[in-house]
Amino acid sequence: MLRSLTRQVCESHGVSVESIEARAKEVNSLCAKWGRHAEYRELEDVTDLCGVRIITLYANDVERARDMLRTEFDVLEEKSRGSEIPEAFGYRSLHMLVRVSTVRCTLSEWKDFGGLVAEFQLRTVLQHAWAVISHRLDYKTSEEVPAKSRRKLFRVAALLETGDELFADFRDEVSNVREEYQKVATAEAWRDLALDLDSVIAAWNRLPLDIVKQTALSAGFSEGTQHIGEAPMRRAIGNLVTVAAHAGIGTVGSLADYMSRAAQYFSALERFASEATTRGFRPVADTPDVLTICLVLDDSRLRVIGALPFRPEIEKALDVVQRELQNSASVAAHGQQGYSTANQHARSYGTGASHD
């Protein structure tokens, strides 16, 4: 119940978490602990009958989770382990002892748990990694570690702490870049934005989307349903950006220019749609996917470089169309070579090709 409640309140408070773990104390463990603590008189005296661990991606999300718990529960104790002494062995973790709030205990599903105490541990992913690995090392204090190995453990702890700080800085920087992209996307300078996932999303409505979609629909694709805020659409734009970058498209404006020429790919797209439909799947006219197909048809190497996650029907249709395009290009190149050879012979005899 506490795991479920924690998940709900994290969502309602907008606290982003990587995972939430919870466990009820095993009876054997409870009996052993009871034997070690003569002061225990009631079940409520045991402070970790239920243990919950909230694992976040970023250090400042630990602080947000802490503030959330202060709001949603009655906090009895709060302790940050490993942070008080700079040279302390190990890594930080925030521990909180909480009780279900008086208000929540008035609800029928929580009335039986009013007096019980639970322990929360709040960690980042990197802090959790350290905790798991150090637990396996079986050392509790730095004095237990062989002196020659102690320095490496301190270095690992320092690197993980630095990593937490850098990840937080990275998130803040990305957030600032996205805000800047949104401002630039409303002005003519949007064309000069360097090509990346966030710049394309910011300028998406400035791009010639209708040209691509109408070309695809006319070629036999089905109507698309994705919207820019949806996760599948974001992944599709990410695939497009990866392939476009490898194709030498470096700015959002260059991508827009490429999109405006989508009609040039009508015949290839029509053949592709026909082949895929014959194999049981009609391709969808979602703009990023259509553009990715166009780029791959332009250069088959991009299909491998981009490690694109196509459906089997799409893969087979691409095989057929790319093979046909390569054969056509080979025939055209051979014909051009023959024409050039004939002109060379004609010139060597002092006559022009038109004379024949």
Image: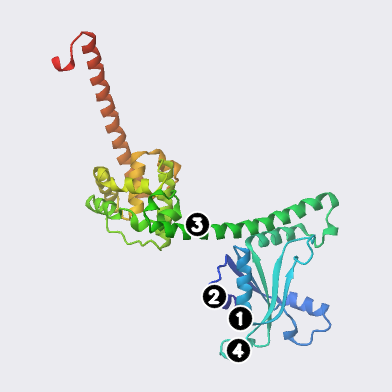
**What separation in Å lies between label 4 and label 3 (alpha carbons)?**
45 Å
**What separation in Å lies between label 2 and label 1 (alpha carbons)?**
10 Å
Q: Residue at x 27, y 33 (%)?
A: 328
The residue identified by callout 2 is 13
Quarter location, residue 117: bottom right
The residue identified by callout 4 is 105
Within 10 angstroms of label 3, few (less than 14), some, or many (20 or more) residues?
some
Ranked by sequence position, the earlier of labels 4 and 1 is 1
Residue 71, numbered circle? 1
Q: Secondary structure at mark 1?
A: helix
- Which quarter of the rendering shows the C terminus? top left
Ranked by sequence position, the earlier of labels 4 and 3 is 4
Whether tag 2 and tag 3 are in contact, CB under 8 A, the answer is no
Give x and y (percent) for residue 146: 84, 53
**Type of amino acid at the residue the image marks with label 1:** Thr
**Type of amino acid at the residue the image marks with label 3:** Val
Q: Is residue 241 above or below residue 49?
A: above
The residue identified by callout 3 is 177
Ranked by sequence position, the earlier of labels 2 and 3 is 2
Residue sitting nearer the eye, 348 or 9: 348
**Type of amino acid at the residue the image marks with label 4:** Cys
Q: Is residue 240 left or right of residue 99?
A: left
Q: Nearer the viewer, mark 4 or mark 3?
A: 3
Q: Secondary structure at mark 4?
A: helix
Q: Is residue 71 visible?
A: yes
Residue extending farthest to the top is 349
Q: Nearer the viewer, mark 4 or mark 1?
A: 1
Ranked by sequence position, the earlier of labels 3 and 1 is 1
